[in-house]
Amino acid sequence: MNDVQVISDIVYNTKIRIKWGKISLVPFPYFFGTHSPMAVKKAAKKKAKRKATQKKSTKSRGRLSPRKDKRGLQAAEVVLGIEANEVASLVAQVEAAGGAAIGGYREPFSGRPMLLAALPIAAVQPTPFQRDLSPTHTKRLAEKIEESGSFLDPLIVVRGEDGRLWTPNGRHRLAAAKVLGLRQITALVSPDEDLAFRILALNTEKAHNLKDRSLEVIRMARNLAARKPRAKESQFAAEFEAPALLTLGMVYEQNRRFAGGAYSPFLKKVDRFSERSLTVSLRERQNYATRLQEIDVRVKRIIAGLQARGFKSPYVRNYVVARINPVRFHRAKKGETKPPMTVAAALTRMAAAAKKFNLDSVRAGDLALVAAVVGDEG
């Protein structure tokens, strides 16, 4: 390279800056690129603005503002005697089960009639689609009730489709009462039979983990499909909470040890409630569940290969699933509900990515980064 060429390159790639009487050469990308004083200043302003917005958002989320216009019934309107026609059928149902009506009232939010009753333990059964019983939680609950000397929390009870009394949210309290040897249990009896399908979101007796929620939702969906075969899946969005729970529920039915938490972020981005009937949509989801299990088999092989190379991190699965996730970089815009691709297309891409996964591309630092991200989210 001759001197003319060198000087030409310097002139092209630099910009002359005059400051305090001195002339200096500044690299061209610095003066006009992302590292220029103007760009740095602009980036600092954007960062400060973003922090201020986040701080304001966090502050507003932590503050609860009471609604200005009041709703619901007045105190006198809540009172309802057990002789009232509104609860006559509930009283008859309770007495037929061998129980006794204690008192009636109108639920203060909707005004629906409710009946407080004492019911024989044997007269109440958990809904068939409720989550599995936890013996450990039941024993602990029975111990705490014994310690306090009081069974204070009535069960919610509705009439089941088999004519018996169902509790949609009191399985563990009912089991604890049996452990304690109680003859009777107090219950709030509702005439709204569909409440059994809407109670999942209100269940705070024992926090649902992903497997519990998914299994309860898919059982509920199968029950509803049998009762209302022509109803659209989207009609039950409130009952099912999230479409991914239906798909994961089918997987958990086949494999209770499935690591659903690793696949949940993927499904949340692509899975949506169907406008087809429940019967048809469940068949379609069964196909998704089968394909997801096939992908997981490949993921297990990849994990085994990485572990053989010395990667012993507990976050290996999260890392591998994130690597083969075709929508991992997609960020939905505010108000956007349309998925970046269909579930079927996403599963096809995910399977292809798992098939060609290169073990040599994994570095220890990658797993450390995943561990830090998962730790922050937790």
Image (cartoon, rainbow, N blue to C red):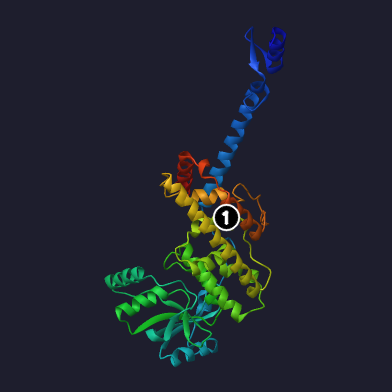
* The quadrant where residue 341 appears: bottom right
* The quadrant where residue 281 appears: bottom right
Depicted 139 relative to depicted 271: above or below: below
User: Is residue 201 in view from this perspective?
Assistant: no
Q: Residue at x 63, y 23 (%)?
A: 37
Of 68 and 19, nearer the camera is 19
| SS assignment at label 1 | helix
User: Is residue 276 in view from this perspective?
Assistant: yes
Q: Residue at x 67, y 78 (%)?
A: 230
Depicted 347 relative to depicted 192: above or below: above
Residue type at mark 1 is Phe
Neighbours of disc 1 within 10 Å: few (<14), some (14-19), many (20+):
many
Of 347 and 40, nearer the camera is 347
Q: Which residue is mark 1?
A: 266
* The quadrant where residue 247 appears: bottom right
- Total numbered labels: 1
x and y percentages locating residue 327 in the rendered image:
62, 51
x and y percentages locating residue 122 in the rendered image:
39, 86
Depicted 304 relative to depicted 148: above or below: above
Q: Residue furthest left?
A: 147
Q: Residue at x 32, y 68 (%)?
A: 140
Left or right, residue 231 beside residue 66: right
x and y percentages locating residue 178 in the rendered image:
34, 80
x and y percentages locating residue 12 in the rendered image:
71, 16
Q: Residue at x 56, y 67 (%)?
A: 246
